[in-house]
Image (tube, rainbow, N blue to C red):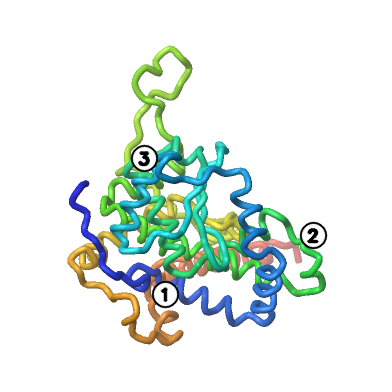
Amino acid sequence: MADRKILTQISPTAWEHPADRAALQTLRAIPGFDEVVRKIASFFGERGVRHLFAGNAVRVGPRQRPKLYALYGEVLETMDWPAGNELYVTQTPTVNAMAVGFDKPFIVINSGLLGLLEREEQRTILGHELGHIMSGHTTYTTMALILLTVGLRNLPFLAGMALLPIELALFEWYRKSELSSDRAGLLSGQDPTAAMMAELKMAGGKPRGVGAEGLGLDDDEINLDEFLVQAEEYETGGTAIDSVFKFLNVAFQTHPFHTVRAAELHRWVRSGEYYRILEGDYPRRGSEPERPLSQDYAEAGSYYEQQARQAMDQVGDVLVRARDAFTQAVRGRPK
C-alpha cells in the first residue's frame, strides 16, 4: 500500500507490549545481571559484535541490493527514524533476522528469510528489527545471542556466576520483546495481512508457485485464516501438561512460536489500538509519561488473565482426577 502514514516522532511506548516492559524490569532486578551485561559488553565491544554477526555479511547500500536499501529507507521514513543503523544480508538458509550491537546497533537479515517473503512482508521484518533498535532492546538481545552463539563454556570471565536465573529471565524477556517488535513491524508496513502472512510463512514455508507441477516441488496453497484458527487453538487448547510442554519448548529460545506471534498480532489489531495509532493517537518521543513498574505488571497481568485462568482451571482438573484415581487405587487394595 502506497498511502502509508508517516508516524511522526512516534515513541516506542506506543507499541511496546506490557509483558515486554514487565519482563525487562524483572530481568534488570536480578542480582548480578548488571555485572553480566558489563562483562559481556566490555569483552566483545562494538568491533567484536560486528566480527561475530556481520563478519561474513554484505552491507546494503545504494549500489548493493539497491531495492532492499530503498525498502529500508521507506521503513525509516514511515517510523520517522533517522538513517544511521546499517543493514546487512548474510548467506544462510536459516530463516531469521536480528538487530544487534551495544552503542551502534545494526540489522542483519538472512538470505533464507528474504527468499521466503514477498516485498511487503520483507517490509514488516525490517520494521520489526528497527523496532528493537528504537526500543533500546539491542544490548540485551546481543547478550542473549552471544550466549547462544558462543556458549557459556567459551566465556570464562563468567565462571562462578549463577547464570541460570539470568539466562531464563533473559530469554523470557527476549520472547516478550518479539511481541513488541512484531507490532512495530506492522506499523511500518501498515498491512495486517502481510504482517501475519509473514508469520505463517516463517512457521511453515511457502509454496513454490506456478510451474512446480511434475518437478517434485511444493505447488500448494496456504491460508491465513486457517493459520489464525490454528494459532488460537494452540494458545487456548490442551491440558495442564500441555502448558508445561509449551514452556519447556521455548525456555531457552529467543523467539516465541509463530502461531503465538500471529495470534498476539491479530488480537492487537482487533483491539483497535493499531488503528488509533494510525489516526495519530500515540505518544511522541521525549514526551512519554512516567510509567511505574506496578503499572506494567498490572497491564501484563490483565492481558494474560484469561489465559492464566484457563491454565489454572486445567491444573485443577488434573489434580482432581489424580486425587480420584489415587483414592480409587487405595480403596481397591486388599486389606
Residue 151: x %, y % from top left: 73, 57
Left or right side of 183 for 316:
right
**Residue 232 shows in the view:** no
Residue in the picture at 31% in, 56% down: 188
Q: Amino acid at mark 2?
A: Arg
The residue labelled by disc 3 is 67
In this view, the mark in front (2 or 1): 2
Q: Could you say whether the residue bearing mark 2 is in a helix, strand or loop?
A: helix
* CA distance separating discs 3 and 2: 41 Å
The residue labelled by disc 1 is 300
Q: Earlier in the sequence, mark 2 or mark 1?
A: 2
Residue 173: x %, y % from top left: 53, 68
Q: Earlier in the sequence, mark 1 or mark 3?
A: 3
Foreground residue, 329 or 148?
A: 148
Q: 10 Å neighbourhood of mark 2: few (<14), some, or many (≥20)?
A: few
Q: Is 229 rendered above or below residue 320?
A: above
Q: Amino acid at mark 3?
A: Lys
The residue labelled by disc 2 is 153
